[in-house]
Amino acid sequence: MGSEYKESKDNPLHREYGIWSNTVYILKKMWEYKPCVIFLVFLGIVCNSVLSYFWGIFGKYVIDIIQLGLSRQEGIRQLTRLMLIAGSINLALNFGRALSDNRVWYNLILVRMNMLTERIAKVLTLRFELVERPDVLDIADRAMRATNSNNNGVEGMMRLMRQALTSAFTLLVTFAAILILDYRLIIALIILGLLQFLYYRKIVRVDKEEVWDKMSPASRKSEYMTRITQDFDFAKDIRLFGLSDFLSGKQEEVNKETIEKMDIHRDLWYKHAFVVQIAYVIIKGLIYATLFVAVFKKNLSISDFTMFLSLAMAFSSALLNFLQRFGDYKKASLEVDDFRS
């Protein structure tokens, strides 16, 4: 019955709350069921972000000490102290990241399981005549799908929120540094990041339409073949009428159809990987070119060159990751709409 509604918006009971409203709603649920997960997520955001450019900053201070022209004994003493400080900070950051990574995933599952219980409780309290209505069954089925997966729906939104916020935090920290270096570099990186993102979304769309959507008939045929060849009720007829070769031939046809679609899938993502590598080379070239110009025209020191290189690479990587995660985040938000509806 639920199939009468091909899109969520076609169901009269469906409500659209928007990304901001759903974000606040999910944060409240995290606070309601597992308050500690908020702290763990924040800890992971800071640690993962800082670690992406930490050694670039460390390298700057190492070069500064080397260029001071200190005596050998004093230089070793200064470098040893710096390495101890940097090592301690790095150890703390890695410990914080490990603590967050190993605790967050489990706690997010617990939050989702509590929301799944909410969904079941809601269904059990509906008046009996409502549970036979197609629109109610449809919205209940969508709510079920929103709570039955680790990577989509309510838990998917929690996981993507963490990834997107980590990238956003990195962008904020590195943006100011690159702006000081050359504002044109930021503009160029943003344009390249947007172009990569648009191409990524195109590949995702084509992959869905040309591969996975068109593979559904083959998947159903494969499931049917598996069912009848393993069902005892059909075993006698298959052997009595000698259908083994016939069914094997049908399975080979299904396999051929599946392989053809997977070849398209492989080629699509091969092209994407090729474009990403080209973009990566261009981005790196722009960063190095900007830094070389700064060395000759702005007297940028070698130590600052090392630091700005690390910050610029972290910025470009975080920008692309943020754009990709934000697209997935919008999709997860739509599934949270289903749950809340």
Image (cartoon, rainbow, N blue to C red):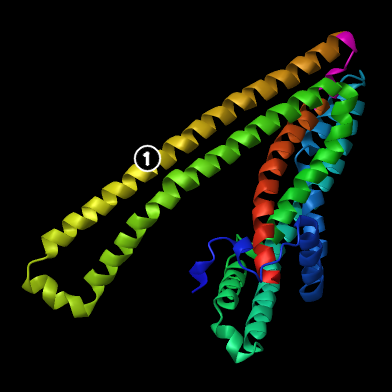
Foreground residue among 323 and 33: 323
Task: Characterize the magenta stretch by its predominant secondary structure.
Answer: helix
Q: Is residue 199 magenta?
A: no
Q: Is residue 87 above or below residue 42?
A: above
Quarter where residue 318 is shown:
top right
Residue 230: percent from the left, percent from the top?
25, 72
Could you tell me the amino acid type at mark 1?
Asp
Coordinates of residue 225 in the picture (x, y in percent): 26, 65
212 with respect to 330 (left or right): left
The residue under the point 82% across, 70% down is 31
- Report the label total: 1
Q: Secondary structure at mark 1?
A: helix
Is residue 308 depicted above or below 234 in this figure? above
Quadrant for the C terminus in the image? bottom right
- Residue at screen point 56% across, 72% down: 138
Residue placed most toward the observer, 232 or 1: 1
Identified at 79% across, 44% down, the residue is 168
Residue 96 image offset from top left, x and y in percent? 78, 56
Instruction: Tell me if 222 is positioned left or right of 339 in this view.
Output: left
Q: Residue at left 49%, top 31%? A: 271
Query: What residue did someone put label 1 on?
Result: 263
Q: Which residues are magenta?
A: 297-306
Percent x, y of residue 81: 89, 38
Kindly tell me whether residue 93 is visible in this rendering: no
